Image (cartoon, rainbow, N blue to C red):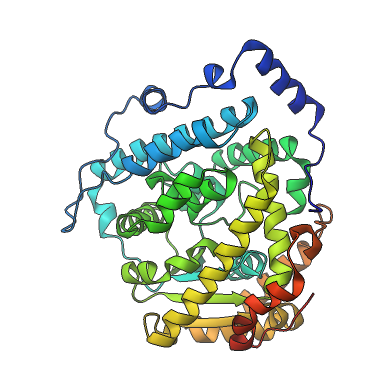
Amino acid sequence: MAWSPPPRPQWVAELNAFGSHLGSPAAIVPLDEASLLDAARAATGLDDFGDRDFGDADGDSSAWREPFGIFVRALDQEADLHLLGRIMVRNEIVRALVNRLEVRATLDRHPEILDERIDSPVLVVGTGRSGTSILHELLAQDPAHRVARTWELLHPCPPPERSTYETDPRIAAADQEYTFWHLVAPEYRTMHENGGNVPNEDPLIDQLEFASDHFMGSYPVPSYSRWLARADLRHVFRAHRRFLQLLQWRCPGDRWILKSPSYLAKLPRFLAEYPDAYVVLTHRDPLKVLPSLVSIMATLRWMHCDSVDVDAVVKSAVGGTAVAMDLVMQWRADGTLPEDRIVDVRFADLVGDPWRTMRAVCERIGTPFTDEAERRMRAYLEASPRERHGRHDYEFADTGLDLDATRARFAAYQARYDIVSEV
């Protein structure tokens, strides 16, 4: 296996060593349900976590408590967190609980938010490293489009307002959090564009329901991953809609442009909630995608844990990618996913002729490709050169997989979408 953990920054190593001298990291930073719930109550002065429903005919809103309990137990029993990792994940969990409390309180005070319409949203989805980020960011340049930026996903209350959207102090707060991630693992900066004002992914919304692939990807929590793979996510996407309604209430746009690579295996449930949505599906050689995905997942786990089981990371990346691709092909073949709602984009086309590709995407989703939108997209791309934060180096050999066997595993997918091999 070629991937190995990079040296930790000295301050991280010293902090974790200091914690080990004081006793168990679990004793210093507790992750039990009661202390996490109490911390959120103390931070907000609120006590209603949203276990009452909003009049939904098919259930209440307390389904979050099961995965919450599974996740925090898995962190203690399975994740091998170091001291700093426990501090970081406690912060994430308390923030999600605080957001639950504040979102619920805001919706109770302003029930008219639930009258907001979410019309024909667009979901950008595909394997990681297949062009989802740049496609999402380019679509975000169209003034008619509304995207969720990091700061409003991390700190949604009070709801954003149009007049202060570009100057809200929460932008700097979110920037600071990602700056801290880069201090913990400097190599992560080369792997993904991060920042308070950057368009970000929907799993940050799903954190409020504790049904988020962000948790599964960042921490080795197999029992939680198994729960998430089997879960009925109906309530998650109902909550997803309410979250978008809250964000657009005082800061509207003509149309939401969403992004979540991890929704690949959840597309039927997403479209059940948003039947008028379009799905923009990106495609790239899986053998080029997998080593990058392994590198990112391993780095995120090294950021939080004392050790990384790289074989488990590879197995998760390959298995999850293969299953998701197989499911999407099956769903398209049997009509579960309506073809007229899906727009296929090959990575090679996106990088080879971005403006022809973007024009074709906009035509399919029914958005005029205006001169102003193209001008803004071109300016954004020119101001965002690849590798501006350094080069993310990875090779297929980093996975330890047999190239021919892996190529054969994805042969049907490549043939179905006419994807060129890059490895």
Number of numbered tags placed on the structure image: 0
Q: Residue visible at 69% across and 67% down?
A: 289
Q: Residue visible at 52% across and 46% down?
A: 215
Extreme-top residue of the structure: 22
**Residue 152 seen in this snapshot:** no
Q: In terms of image quadrants, where is residue 11?
A: top right
- Where is residue 34? Give x, y as percent: 36, 24
Would residue 216 appear left or right of 191 to someone viewing this image?
left
Q: Camera-side residue: 147 or 314?
A: 314
- Where is residue 77? Give x, y as percent: 50, 32
Q: Residue visible at 43% across and 87% down?
A: 333
Q: Residue visible at 79% across and 74% down?
A: 423
**Residue 409 seen in this snapshot:** yes
- Where is residue 29? Give x, y as percent: 53, 21
- In the image, residue 98 above or below residue 242: above
- In the image, residue 224 above or below residue 387: above
Q: Camera-side residue: 68 or 323?
A: 323
- In the image, residue 145 above or below residue 86: below
Q: Camera-side residue: 244 or 113?
A: 244
Would residue 97 appear left or right of 57 to someone viewing this image?
right
Would residue 363 appear left or right of 106 to someone viewing this image?
right
- Where is residue 142? Give x, y as percent: 57, 71
- In the image, residue 50 above or below residue 163: above
